[in-house]
Image (cartoon, rainbow, N blue to C red):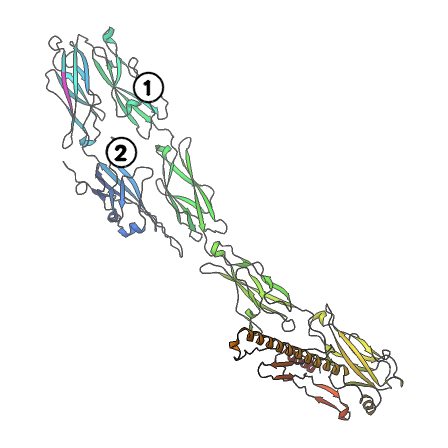
């Protein structure tokens, strides 16, 4: 009979009481969804199906889509056993992977089933599949030996029984051993009988033996199974007829029962089989032998043929075989025999620790997962029985995780509280599983779990605010200060970059004042600072991490400009002019301490750099005047007399308190007279700033000399070049000479430090090689608004408006200084 494994023998059994557990959670970004679902599906197939044969449509039976099997990375988990069945994800079906031999897999155990699990991920699902393996008639009955020999006395009585060797059929049920038959014989008949579940057979004498007629009898014993087609096995029985031995051995009891621990050592005496024979002499000697032993038991047990002591010679394993039934034959020398049975019950001992099988695990998990997230699924097996096989699992000192049992021998490790990678980035989770035997056995496994970072920490500055100092007149690009922020996250999420927040200082973007290094947080000056223009400013620095989305924080930075003594004092009064005389008049009747005038000066610096002191540097008569060191007041220190000269010239120096100190000098002309005409007569021949005119003449002559020297030098160079080129190539003789422009430098000079504004002269000479023309432009110095005394003006004092040189640039340092001085003077007034 041919068995169609696909169409005829595959039947799907659904467990009506299908157990389902659902554990579901969701989250936002980078988060898995774990769904734990346990169901049981059963199938039944015959053994010996060819590879690739269909077991069942698992996708349809579980209500799953074929695409779900692929996306969920469906796989079969069999623990440490052989994988006989595989999952075809394309068809959504279970198919045969390896040939299944029911006899090799289960032996005589019924029913025979394969148990495995199907696991899916994202979300995680878990299904239990049971495949029952049904028997086919692929094994014929057989005998251990090729023949059986009996020595039977001719005096044996009719009805005597002779135990025959039991046939063995590895198949079960109807396909197993069903009956025996004996070849045609008028001397013996068969008598089948059962002892427990074992089918035994004995041969019964129905006709007296007569050695003289027949001393040897040959028979064929046939064992038949119940399969279709029916299979059989045969053994030859050879009987030798002996002279009289008319008593057979008799066992003292039909069954000898004993219990033995599975860890008993070799040589352990299990029981003693005893039998007696009424005959005397050699015919009364009983010998013991194992006649029928289950497969594999002959290597475990032995019996002493003389004493009947039944001993253990192998190693027992309760988890493989728990019960043995062994036939022991007691026979005498005449061939008479009796059979008794030794029944051995193997007792379990706690000799197997639990076996932990990791079905699915996550090596890394995000720190923002919710409590209850499944991390690992485990199957724990203990082949021991009863209490020895009951297991429980615990975690070693972990407050963030717990272990729960979803079904018998299945455990899950889940999160029990919120995780924080900044506190612990890795966990070593040790799972210990113990049985309930005495003493208890245990196994443990350590799982390493990495906590992946989530950008949940913003950068934090080391200070709540910063203050930095920089001295004015700094070099652009100099480093001022460093701000630093740290981020407790990891990797890209902790990479901090620094940015200036958009703001303005006095209407100008802060980026034109300072810049910041995005990586180091170093703040640099973009420009040179002037304390007199800006004393301090503040801005905000933003620290941003590299997460997605990024987190930010900011801090206020205040830059304080420190003053430098970079400005000399500026004399506001008396006003100095280049060509006129300013004089203070003192009556001859002035008393001691008479206030002549007051030198007014300012310093745009601050602090001690702006503290001014005054002292008299030169004077026509030092015994007549004194200058207040703090207020600049010029007073008389004695009574004015008629002998004192009318014209008095005082040189006052004004110094600041900076390091190094800077100063300015002012000339104060004092007229000692009682009337104004007297003053005019005395000051009519007063030299109009002879020093000023002498200096001007000197610099003009020097400038003309330098320009003339440069002109002659250029002319000589041009002529030399032309001669050189003429000599090199005559074909260029009539060609145009190249124009070589020459731009002489500008010259400037400052006359003295008299406290007045600087006088600048500019000379510009332009020469060409072909025109033989030269132009010389002279720029006249600009002057302030001053009160002057000019002899040609009949003693009257007139304001003179300053004139600007046509060569002065609007934004030149000179013009700036003029405007600054005018402003200060106007404010002082």
Image disc number at residue 281: none
Q: Is residue 38 left or right of residue 189?
A: right
Q: Is residue 636 left or right of residue 437?
A: right
**Place of residue 725 in the rendered image (x, y in percent of width and height, measured from the top left):** 55, 74
Pick the quarter of the image with the N terminus: top left
Q: Which residues are magenta?
A: 218-224
- The residue at which mark 1 appears reads as 311
- The residue at which mark 2 appears reads as 105
List the single residue furthest toward the bottom: 794
Viewer-closest of 400 and 541: 541
Viewer-closest of 15 and 682: 682
Disc 2: CA contacts within 10 A as few (<14), some (14-19) or many (>=20): few
Q: Is residue 303 left or right of residue 515?
A: left
Residue depicted at 53% across the width and 76% down the height: 730
**Place of residue 133 in the rendered image (x, y in percent of width and height, measured from the top left):** 23, 37
Q: Is residue 231 visible?
A: yes
Indicate the secondary structure of the residue bearing disc 2.
helix
Indicate the secondary structure of the residue bearing disc 1.
strand
280 in relation to 648, above or below: above
Viewer-closest of 89 and 779: 779
Residue depicted at 30% across the width and 13% down the height: 307
Query: What distance separates the C-alpha of mark 2 from that of mark 1?
Result: 29 Å
26 in relation to 512, above or below: above
Residue 737 lies in magenta, yes or no?
Answer: no
List the single residue furthest toward the top: 281
**Place of residue 106 in the rendered image (x, y in percent of width and height, measured from the top left):** 26, 33
């Amino acid at each position: 009979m041919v068995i169609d494994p696909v169409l005829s023998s595959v039947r799907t059994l659904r467990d009506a009481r299908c157990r389902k557990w659902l554990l579901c959670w969701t989250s936002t970004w980078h988060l898995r969804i774990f769904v734990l679902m346990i169901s049981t599906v059963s199938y039944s197939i015959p053994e010996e199906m060819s590879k690739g044969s269909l077991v069942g449509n698992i996708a349809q039976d579980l209500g799953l889509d074929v695409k779900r099997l692929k996306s969920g990375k469906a796989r079969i988990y069999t623990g440490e056993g052989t994988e006989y069945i595989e999952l075809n994800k394309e068809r959504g079906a279970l198919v045969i992977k390896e040939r299944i031999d029911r006899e090799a897999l289960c032996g005589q155990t019924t029913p025979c089933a394969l148990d495995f699990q199907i696991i899916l991920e994202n979300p995680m699902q878990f299904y239990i599949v049971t495949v029952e393996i049904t028997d086919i008639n692929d094994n014929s009955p057989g005998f251990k030996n090729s023949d059986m020999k009996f020595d039977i006395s001719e005096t044996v009585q009719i009805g005597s029984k002779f135990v025959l060797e039991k046939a063995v059929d590895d198949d079960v049920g109807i396909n197993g051993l069903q009956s025996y038959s004996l070849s045609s014989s008028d001397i013996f008949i068969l008598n089948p009988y059962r002892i427990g579940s074992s089918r035994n057979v004995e041969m019964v004498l129905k006709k007296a033996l007569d050695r003289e007629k027949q001393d040897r009898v040959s028979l064929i014993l046939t064992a038949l199974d119940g399969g279709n087609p029916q299979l059989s096995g045969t053994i030859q029985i050879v009987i030798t007829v002996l002279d009289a031995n008319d008593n057979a051995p008799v066992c003292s009891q039909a069954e000898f029962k004993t219990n033995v621990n599975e860890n008993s050592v070799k040589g352990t005496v299990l029981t003693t089989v005893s039998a007696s024979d009424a005959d005397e002499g050699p015919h009364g000697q009983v010998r013991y032998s194992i006649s029928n032993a289950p497969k594999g038991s002959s290597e475990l047990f032995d019996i002493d043929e003389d004493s009947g002591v039944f001993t253990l010679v192998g190693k027992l394993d309760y988890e493989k075989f728990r019960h043995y039934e062994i036939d022991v034959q007691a026979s005498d020398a005449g061939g008479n025999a009796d059979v008794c049975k030794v029944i051995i019950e193997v007792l379990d001992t706690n000799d197997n620790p639990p076996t932990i099988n990791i079905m699915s695990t996550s090596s890394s998990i995000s720190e923002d997962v919710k409590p209850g997230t499944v991390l690992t699924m485990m199957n724990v097996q203990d082949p021991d029985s009863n209490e020895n096989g009951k297991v429980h699992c615990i975690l070693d000192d972990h407050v963030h995780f717990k272990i729960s049992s979803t079904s018998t021998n299945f455990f899950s490790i889940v999160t029990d509280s919120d995780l924080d990678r900044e506190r612990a980035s890795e966990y070593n989770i040790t799972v210990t599983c113990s049985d309930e035997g005495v003493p208890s056995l245990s196994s443990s496994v350590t799982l390493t779990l990495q906590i992946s970072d989530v950008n949940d920490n913003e950068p934090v500055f080391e200070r709540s605010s910063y203050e930095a100092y920089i001295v004015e007149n700094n070099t652009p690009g100099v480093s001022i200060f460093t701000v630093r922020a740290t981020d407790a996250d990891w990797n890209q999420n902790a990479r901090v970059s620094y940015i200036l927040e958009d703001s303005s200082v006095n209407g100008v973007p802060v980026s034109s004042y300072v810049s910041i290094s995005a990586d180091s947080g170093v703040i640099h000056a973009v420009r040179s600072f002037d304390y007199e223009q800006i004393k301090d400013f503040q801005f905000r620095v933003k620290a941003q991490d590299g997460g997605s989305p990024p987190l930010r924080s900011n801090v206020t930075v205040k830059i304080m400009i420190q003053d430098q003594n970079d400005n000399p004092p500026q004399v506001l009064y008396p006003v100095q002019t280049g060509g006129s005389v300013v004089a203070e008049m003192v009556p001859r009747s002035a008393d001691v301490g008479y206030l002549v005038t007051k030198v007014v000066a300012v310093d745009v610096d601050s602090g001690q750099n702006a503290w001014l002191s005054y002292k008299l540097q030169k004077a026509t008569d030092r015994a007549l005047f004194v200058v207040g060191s703090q207020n600049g007041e010029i007073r008389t220190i004695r009574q004015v007399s008629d002998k004192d000269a009318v014209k008095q010239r005082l040189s006052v120096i004004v110094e600041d308190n900076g390091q190094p100190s800077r100063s300015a000098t002012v000339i104060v002309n004092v007229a000692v007279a009682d009337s104004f005409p007297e003053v005019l007569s005395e000051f009519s021949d007063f030299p109009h700033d002879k020093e000023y005119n002498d200096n001007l003449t000197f610099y003009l002559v020097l400038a003309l000399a330098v320009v003339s020297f440069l002109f002659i030098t250029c002319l000589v160079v041009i002529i030399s070049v032309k001669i050189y080129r003429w000599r090199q190539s005559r074909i260029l003789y009539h060609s145009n000479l190249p124009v070589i422009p020459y731009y002489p430098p500008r010259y400037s000079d400052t006359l003295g430090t008299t406290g007045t504004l600087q006088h600048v002269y500019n000379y510009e000479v332009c020469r060409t090689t072909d025109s033989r023309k030269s132009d010389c432009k002279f720029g006249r110095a600009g002057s302030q608004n001053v009160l002057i005394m000019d002899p040609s003006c009949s003693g009257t004092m007139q304001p003179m408006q300053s004139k600007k040189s046509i060569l002065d640039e609007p934004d030149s340092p000179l013009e700036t200084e003029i405007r600054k001085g005018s402003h200060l003077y106007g404010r002082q007034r």
